[in-house]
Amino acid sequence: IFSLITTILKRALKNIDYCQNEKIWEKSEIYTPLIMKEFVQQYREALSKLLPDMTNVIAVWQSFLKQDKAQEGQKKKGTETASYMEETNETNKEHSLDDVEITLLKAVLLQVICLYQQVVPHLVAQSNFDFSKLIKGIFTEKGLQQEISPVLHYHILKLALELPANKFSWFRIQDAVEKVCGEKSVFYLLMKMFVTSRHSQLKIATKKLIFKVLHDSGVFEYTGKELELWLSHLDNTVEAKKEIVIQFLERVLVKVVTNPYPYTDKAADFVQEASILQVNLFKQDVDNISVPISHIDDV
C-alpha cells in the first residue's frame, strides 16, 4: 500500500512542480501564474482528502517499533538445551528475513512522510506528533547501529531536513523514563552520529541537519562560519576526547537555545561597549593628530 502511495505522491509532486513553473504560464494565453497557484492549492486539498491521515501513517511506524522490541525480548531469553538452540537458530533465520522486510517497509514509510511534507504539507503541520521519536528508533548513543541499514539513516536525515525544525524536540529529553535512564537529547545523538558515521553521504547530511537545527533556533542565524569551525574541530578531535567535547557542546547549546535571552543580551552589551570604546579611541586619535590653531598662527 505504501509503495502505491509513494508512486502517487511522486507523480503528484511532478505535477505540482510543473504547475508552479511560472516561465511556462507567462507565455500562456489562457492560464496565468496566479491561476495555476490557486489550482495547486486546490490540488493539494483534493489529494489530502484521498490520502491516509498522518496519525494512521505514524501508527504503522509505531507498530514496527513494537515488533522490534518483541524480537529483542526473545533474543534476550536464555537457552538451556542444544535442541532449543537449533530451534532458536531456525527462528532467527526466519526473523532475519522479516527484519529485512521491515527495514524496507520503514524506509518506504519515511519516504512517504517526506513526500507528505512536499505534496500535502498542511497534513504534516496539523499533526501534533513529535517526530523526534522516529529518530530515537534509529540513532543511539553509540552512534550508528550495525543492525540498522544505512538506508534508514539516509531517509530519516532526509525527512528531518525536509520537515520544519519545530516538529522535533532536539534539545530536551522526551519523557520522564528517559530522564531516569540517563538518556541524552536528540541533538546529542545527532552530534554523536556525525563523528561516528563512516558513510560520507550520511556525514554530509548530518552536518546539514545540525546547521539547520541551530540556524532555525534563531540564535545562530548569522554565525554559519562559527558553526562550521566548531564541527570541523569536533570531527578532528582525538577519539578519546570526542565524547567529552560532545557532552560539553550539548550542555552549552541546550542552555543557549532553550533560554537565549540572557546570553544574547550579554552579547549585545559587549558589542555596544566595544563600539563606544572604538568611537572614543577614534576621537582620541583625532585629537592627537589635530594641530592647535594657535600654533598655526605663530608659524
Image: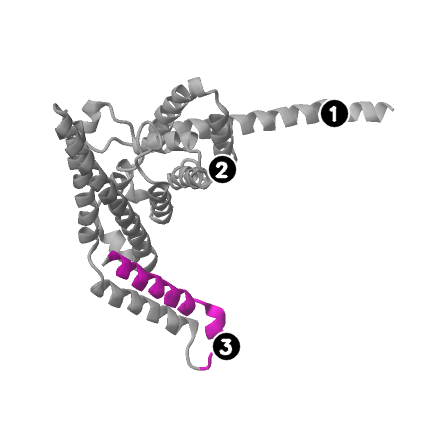
Camera-side mark, 3 or 1: 3
Amino acid bearing label 1: Ile
Place of residue 67 in the rendered image (x, y in percent of width and height, measured from the top left): 17, 40
In three-dimensional space, the C-alpha distance between marks 3 and 1, rounded to whole angstroms, equals 65 Å
Direction top: furthest residue: 240
For label 2, the residue is 224
User: Could you tell me which secondary element the residue under label 1 belongs to?
Assistant: helix
**Quadrant housing the C terminus:** top right
Place residue 284 in its image quadrant: top right
User: Could you tell me which secondary element the residue under label 3 belongs to?
Assistant: loop
Asked if 66 appears above or below 264 in the picture, the reply is below
Direction front: furthest residue: 83
In three-dimensional space, the C-alpha distance between marks 1 and 2, rounded to whole angstroms, equals 40 Å
Magenta residues span: 2-29
In terms of depth relative to the viewer, which is nearer, 137 or 170?
137
From the viewer's perspective, tell me whether residue 272 is left or right of residue 282: left
Q: Is residue 130 visible?
A: no
Place of residue 22 in the rendered image (x, y in percent of width and height, measured from the top left): 46, 69
From the viewer's perspective, tell me whether residue 275 is left or right of residue 249: right
Residue 5 highlighted magenta (yes or no) = yes
Magenta stretch, main secondary structure class: helix
In three-dimensional space, the C-alpha distance between marks 2 and 3, rounded to whole angstroms, equals 40 Å
Place residue 190 in its image quadrant: top left
